[in-house]
Image: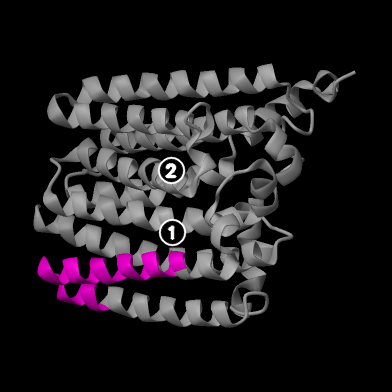
Amino acid sequence: MPVSARLGFTDKVRAHLELLDPVTWISVFPCLAAGVMASGAMQPTLHDYLLLFAIFLMFGPLGTGFSQSVNDCFDLELDRVNEPTRPIPSGRLSPKEGLANSIVALLLAIAIAVYLGLHIGGLRGLIIVSSIMTALFVAYIYSAPPLKLKKNIFGSAPAVGFSYGFAPFLAANALFGDIRPEAIWMATLNFFMAVALIILNDFKSAAGDKEGGLKSLTVMIGARNTFLVSFAIIDTVFATLAFLAFSWGFVIPACFVLVGLVLSVVIQAQLLHDPKGSISFMNSAVEDGFGNVLGKSDVHEHNAFLRYQIANNILFLVNNLFVAGMVGYKYL
């Protein structure tokens, strides 16, 4: 008898939630928060808080949930190697149940998008609807044949950067105000930061990717060179954000971003010197704290990435929100 047939109702619900991968839901919130702050137009009212919750639900549990669910549906054989404990390869959900999960998430995300589009109206409403619809489409072709963007890093990384960085920032900005040049610049920087981090995240699945013929950067150029490419993108994002902040007249935020860049480079140098043992002050955060959210890995390079991810995300999040807040304040 299949495992899925033996599970009780509660275990089934847990398996469906796990398929939506709650760990990934929070990844879009910093971009949403920064987009809202850059608009400078959100008011401390129940109406605006409900709008913020609706757009987080649309991009988070439903949007990223759909992307994770549909990915598991199409990558069953790969997951038997890379992540055999996931709901479908472990047998806790059947492939048909996984497909139903992704369809429900997709339809609910579209329903919220249509409501927000009609509620906001005009060009801003159109931007919100087109952002999530495009992100959902990209999430589908990321995993589904014949395009299956994840087969090659030159398709997969931009797809993730758009869906997790650019689209959420732009939609959240349009939720409360007009899209201004500063918002487009910041959405683009969030795109590239997401690209850099997804490149490193591929460490955990390098073995399965190689076996399955997927051309992740780690498979193509090796772990150390992958670190170097990702670090170059991250440092460019920090440097560009500092330059833009200064050019917009935000001198103090620009200085903070430069400090973040220096700290990031110091951590990167330690990581390149000793991927297995460096950034030891983050070990407890990964193993006992954020490890429950970010996950753990048996791959040394991926564990190193998890330690670096915590440090880098804190640095970028603080500076990203600081500059976004100044942009919003400028247009008050």
Mark number for residue 196?
1
Residue displayed at 24% across by 24% down = 117
Task: Specify which label sits upstream in the sequence, 2 or 1.
Answer: 2
Q: Residue 86's spot in the image, x, y percent?
A: 71, 37
Residue 38 seen anywhere in this rendered image of the structure: yes
Is 251 a magenta residue?
A: yes
Q: Mark 1 falls on what kind of element?
A: helix
Q: Residue 184's spot in the image, x, y percent?
A: 20, 49
Q: Residue 63's spot in the image, x, y percent?
A: 45, 32
User: What colour scheme was applied to this rendering of the protein?
Assistant: one colour
Residue 45 seen anywhere in this rendered image of the structure: no
Mark number for residue 155?
2
Is 267 a magenta residue?
A: no
Residue displayed at 23% across by 58% down = 324
Q: Residue 239's spot in the image, x, y percent?
A: 27, 72
Q: Marks 2 and 1, Cα distance to the nearest angstrom?
A: 13 Å
Relative height, residue 46 to residue 30 (above, below):
above
**Residue 139 appears in which quarter of the rendering?**
top left
Q: Mark 2 falls on what kind of element?
A: helix
Residue displayed at 15% across by 43% down = 179
| Main SS, magenta residues | helix
Q: Three-letter amino acid code at disc 1?
A: Ala
- The magenta stretch is 229-255
> Relative to 114, is 313 on the left or the right?
right
Q: Three-letter amino acid code at disc 2?
A: Gly
**Residue 316 appears in which quarter of the rendering?**
bottom left
